[in-house]
Image (cartoon, grey):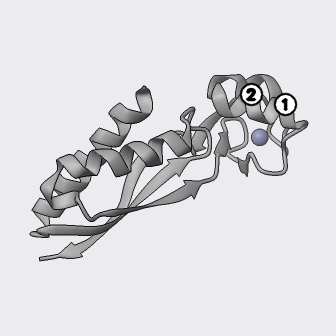
């Protein structure tokens, strides 16, 4: 049910954002969806479409999902690398998607082989842009 709570806060943020820009009717909102986000994307989109009905300004808003690939920053050598291409097997990759903390067990910096890295992108959900009519 986390998807519904998150969808609601995304719509609320979009409506607030629209208010700040004097937009009365939201037409489109870009929602960045991190690759490591442990959420069901289909449920999230469904929740967005259902919940927008409760917000007069967002009723007609189309939510465009923008996938953000996971990126890691090595703490040892500052090398930035992506999850894509580093996945050893599909099973492990799936596992990493659901439990980002487990990435450290499976991944190493491709440059210096250090397992000490932080997740630089791909964890969150945020609004990238909004479009609408004033
Ligand atoms: Zn490194």
Q: Quadrant of residue 7?
A: top left
Please, what secondary structure does the residue beneath circle 2 have? helix
- Residue at figure coordinates x 72%, y 31% from the top left: 96
**Quadrant of the frame with the C terminus:** bottom left
Residue 124 visible in image: no
Q: How many marks?
A: 2
- Please name whichever residue, 110 or 18, is drawn nearer the observer in this view of the structure: 18
Left or right side of 118 for 103: right
CB at mark 2 closer than 8 A to ligand 1? Answer: no
Residue nearest the viewer, comparing 17 with 48 = 48
Which percent across, then down, holds residue 6?
Answer: 36, 36
Q: Are marks 2 and 1 in contact (CB under 8 Å)?
A: yes
In the picture as drawn, the residue positioned furthest to the bottom comes out as 133
Which mark identifies residue 63?
A: none
Q: Is residue 106 left or right of residue 124?
A: right
Q: Residues within 10 Å of mark 1 (few under 14, many from 20)?
A: few
- Determine if residue 120 is in view: yes
**Left or right of residue 124, residue 75 in this image:** right
Mark 1 element type:
helix
Give the distance between the C-alpha atoms of the residues marked 2 and 1, in whole angstroms.
6 Å
Instruction: Report which residue position mark 2 lands on.
Output: 95
Q: Quadrant of residue 112?
A: top right
Residue at 56% over, 37% down: 40
Question: What residue is shown at x 11% (from left), y 61% (from top)?
Answer: 19
Mark 1 = which residue? 91
Where is residue 118 shown, x and y percent of the image? 62, 34
> Which residue lies at the image location 42% right of the left edge and 28% below the top edge?
2
Quarter of the render that holds ligand 1: top right
Examine the rendered structure and indicate whether residue 134 appears above or below residue 70.
below
- Image quadrant where one finds the N terminus: top left
């Amino acid at each position: 049910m986390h998807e519904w709570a998150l969808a609601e806060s995304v719509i609320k943020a979009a409506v607030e954002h629209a208010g700040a820009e004097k937009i009365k009717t939201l037409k489109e909102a870009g929602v960045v969806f991190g690759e490591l986000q442990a959420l069901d994307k289909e449920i999230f989109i469904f929740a967005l479409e259902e919940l927008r009905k409760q917000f007069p300004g967002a009723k007609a808003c189309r939510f465009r999902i923008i996938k953000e690939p996971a990126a890691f920053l090595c703490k040892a050598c500052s090398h930035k690398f992506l999850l894509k291409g580093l996945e050893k097997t599909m099973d492990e990759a799936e596992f990493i998607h659901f439990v980002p903390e487990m990435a450290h067990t499976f991944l190493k910096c491709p440059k210096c082989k250090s397992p000490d890295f932080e997740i630089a992108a791909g964890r969150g959900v945020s609004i990238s842009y909004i479009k609408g009519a004033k």
